[in-house]
Amino acid sequence: MFKNGHGQKRILILFLIAAVLTCSAAGTIDAWATTVESLQSEIDSLDSEIDDLEKQKKEAEEEKNEAQSGLSGTNSKISSISGAMGDLDAEIEGVDQELIGLLTAIDMIQADIENKITQIAQTQTEYDEAVKLRDEQYESMKIRIRYMYEQGDATYISIFIEAASSLADALNKAEYVEQLYEYDRLMLEQYMATVQYTKEVWDRLEEEKSELETSKIELEEEQKYLEELEAELQAEYENYGVMLAQAKQQAAIFTARINQQTNEIRDLEQKEAEKRKEAEAKKKEKEAEEQRLREEAEAAAAAAAAAENGESTDTSTETTSYTEDTGSTSSSSSGGTTVTASGSGTGAQIANYALQFVGNPYVAGGTDPVNGADCSGFVQAVYRAFGISLPRTSYAQSTVGTAVSYSEARAGDILYYGGHVGIYIGNGQIVHASTQRTGIKISPATYRSIITIRRVVN
């Protein structure tokens, strides 16, 4: 069969080499297969951990959204209570002013009443003197009238007879009698006039006094009503104060919950990113092992085929470089790949417009995103470029539009952190005027506790 022993020896050696290579390749393949299975098990475990982290993060976000909703409602309640307390305070001040006016009026009326009492007392004295004079004159006139009645006309005849010797004397006596009657008549008229005048004055003063006392009673009743009203308003104000304190305490609890959930979400995101990075590394390692396994199998097959064909075999293998395109794009706020906002529509346009100012300076009180702006001035200027007017302060900007949850946030939304605002650009990032040291920059959206997220454009 073989021409010589040398040929037989060569063929035997080739078969032995092929057998050795085949056995070696089989052992290597088994070893690599075990390694691949181990890597796949680790990848599966990492994927399970990532799923669990995502579930925990979703639950934390739901709890945070619930706390944010509660905080928003509590802040509205605080605003409503504060407004009601302001109205009550103004009303109480108005009642106080009215009470001051009433007390002044009561004091003035009391002084007028005392003056009237003094005037009445004076009039009473005059009246008493007039009555006394009237009584004296009345008694005198009664005596004279009774005397004339008892004497009849003889008295006057005797006066004239006694004066008959002298006509002048008779005339004088007649004139005297007439003067006497006239005097009595005048005195009576004066007396009656005095009594009538005194009575009129008395009645008038009594009426004025009665009116003043009535007015005083009415004012005192009104004073009593106002004092009761003020007490009720004060009690209501104090009740609102208790409600306000309770609402602020509730707001503090919600804020603490939001901070806790924000920190938990940030930690979960960090852990998830680490697990994803580890899983990605394991996947690459597995793919590299699979590639090596394929190369070993191909080399063993090639060696076996060469042995069968009587060809010389080079057992060295050429290492093939392996790279994986993950399809990800790196981003940087200070250079390299240009960052663009996620999504589309006006919100994405606003976010992309804001990104062009990254690197520009932060200036307290500024509203120019080119030469310098603070956080709220930056947000206001960006939205103004799209014809949208926003308030100037960060707190006021936290009340515009409608509230959305963090899981629903999209490019263009305004994120409020309590004294600071930024514009969401998607992918868990914001662009904002940060500090004088860093200027306008890109940061993770959860770098601080988010108080509320406001959507101004759809």
Image (cartoon, rainbow, N blue to C red):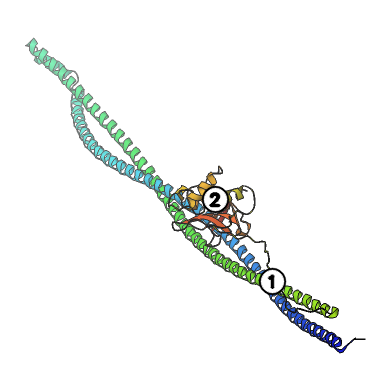
In this rendering, would 15 be left or right of 451?
right
Where on the picture, by quarter, is residue 66?
A: bottom right
Q: Position of residue 15 (x, y in %)?
A: 83, 85
For marks 1 and 2, the one nearer the N-term is 1
Q: Count neighbours of disc 1 (C-alpha within 10 A) and say few if under 14, some if 14 to 19, many if 20 or more.
A: some
**Can see residue 207?**
yes
Label at residue 31: none
**Amino acid at circle 2:** Ala
Residue in the foreground of this view, choosing between 77 and 384:
384
Where on the picture, by quarter, is residue 263?
A: bottom right
Mark 1 to mark 2 CA distance (whole Å): 37 Å
Label at residue 354: 2
Residue in the foreground of this view, choosing between 122 and 451:
451
In terms of secondary structure, where does tag 2 sit? helix
Work out which residue is located at the far top of the displayed protein and give it.
167
**Can see residue 73?**
no
Residues at discs 1 and 2 in contact (Cβ within 8 Å): no
In front: label 1 or label 2: 1
Work out which residue is located at the far front of the displayed protein and give it.
4
**Amino acid at circle 1:** Lys
Where on the picture, by quarter, is residue 69?
A: bottom right
Work out which residue is located at the far right of the displayed protein and give it.
1
Count of numbered tags: 2
Work out which residue is located at the far left of the displayed protein and give it.
165
Q: Position of residue 226 (x, y in %)?
A: 41, 47
Label at residue 283: 1
In terms of secondary structure, where does tag 1 sit? helix
The residue located at (70%, 76%) in the rendering is 39
Q: Position of residue 119 (x, y in %)?
A: 24, 37
The residue located at (55%, 56%) in the rendering is 430
Q: Position of residue 132 (x, y in %)?
A: 20, 34
As displayed, is residue 313 above or below residue 334? below
